[in-house]
Amino acid sequence: MHKLLIVGTVAFDAIETPFGKTDKILGGAATYIGLAASQFKADAAIVSVVGGDFPKKYLDLLVQRNIDISALEVVENGKTFFWSGKYKNDLNSRDTLDTQLNVLADFNPKVPESFKNAGIVMLGNLHPAVQNSVIDQMTTEPELIILDTMNFWMDNTLEELKKVIAKVDVITINDEEARQLTGEYSLVVAARKIQAMGPKYVVIKKGEHGALLFHKEQIFFAPALPLESVFDPTGAGDTFAGGFAGFLSKTNNLSFENMKNAVIYGSTLASFCVEKFGTERMQTLTFKELNMRLQQFKSLTQFEIELT
Ligand code: AMP
């Protein structure tokens, strides 16, 4: 088992989908990543920051999942990062209504001593300067650095983001963002261009249309499970990344073949995440349920053809 260091936002979200609306609820990239990775009993720690307004019960939730939160700083007189978004009717696209960095604006991350030698570093979505600082604090070179980011950072801090991209092994990004980053419409061409920027592996997430994994000339595709109930896609990307990283940290095998399985686990976990608002479904999910759905996934995608 590799130690897993997670960096990302721990946040308040206010979400609107065609099915309803929430007030401030628990969200944040690192929260979703941590909850997903905890399914693999990962030895994980979160580096992040919240304000004094962040409820203790949310912190307790992470601790119950065996996530080390000693580097989750609480700024007593500050406010927690807040994000608000509204989904269109197809649930595949959303508008960001508000992003308030609050305590994230002057956050100096401190990697715990015991995680400075983590084998896998999962850089969840947040300011690239923070992601960079975390990489710089590692005392032994991680076996795998995975980066997740979003258009907000491409719009606001592109040069800093490019520096991080140059240092990572895997990037997970959605289709729209891959196009924005490279100026290419074809995802195959976009993935090639992103590989030239640094990452040897590129995962492009396509929402309800699945995910693609690129490595050199190889491509692997995993569909998303066709679901009866899709309620709120928030955090699906982070959950995918958390599942991907959690599975790799458990299995200790960083080959392309094993990454295919990591993509499948990530997709399966994301399929649960979207069934309820926010983190609700991920809080109750059991490993048994995960494996049952994986079985469905297998029968959905398995076929035998004799090529003549
Ligand atoms: P996803 O739906 O996977 O893109 O992730 C949604 C989560 O990302 C929400 O819980 C937000 O709190 C968080 N989030 C939204 N915008 C940002 C941002 N600019 N930086 C970091 N995290 C963000």
Image (cartoon, helix red, strand yellow):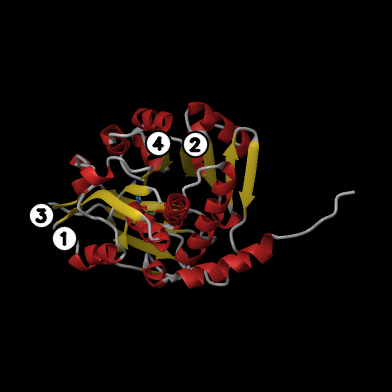
- State the mark number for residue 169: none
Q: Is label 3 in contact with label 2 (beta carbons under 8 Å)?
A: no
Residue beneath disc 3 = 76
Quick one: SS at disc 1? loop
Judge: label 4 CB < 8 Å from ligand 1: no
Determine the image quadrant of residue 52: bottom left
The residue that disc 2 covers is: 180
At 34% from the left and 68% from the top, the residue drawn is 22
Q: Which mark is residue 53?
A: 1
Report the Cα–Cα distance between label 3 and label 1. Answer: 8 Å
Residue visible at 21% across and 43% down in the picture? 113
SS category of the residue bearing label 3 = loop
Q: Are marks 4 and 2 in contact (CB under 8 Å)?
A: yes
Q: CA distance from mark 1 to mark 4?
A: 29 Å
Q: Bin the neighbour count of mark 2 within 10 Å (Cα to Cα): few under 14, some 14-19, many 20 and up.
A: some
Q: Give the x, y percent position of residue 46.
A: 28, 51
Residue bearing mark 4: 154
Residue 81 in the image: x percent, y percent?
A: 25, 52
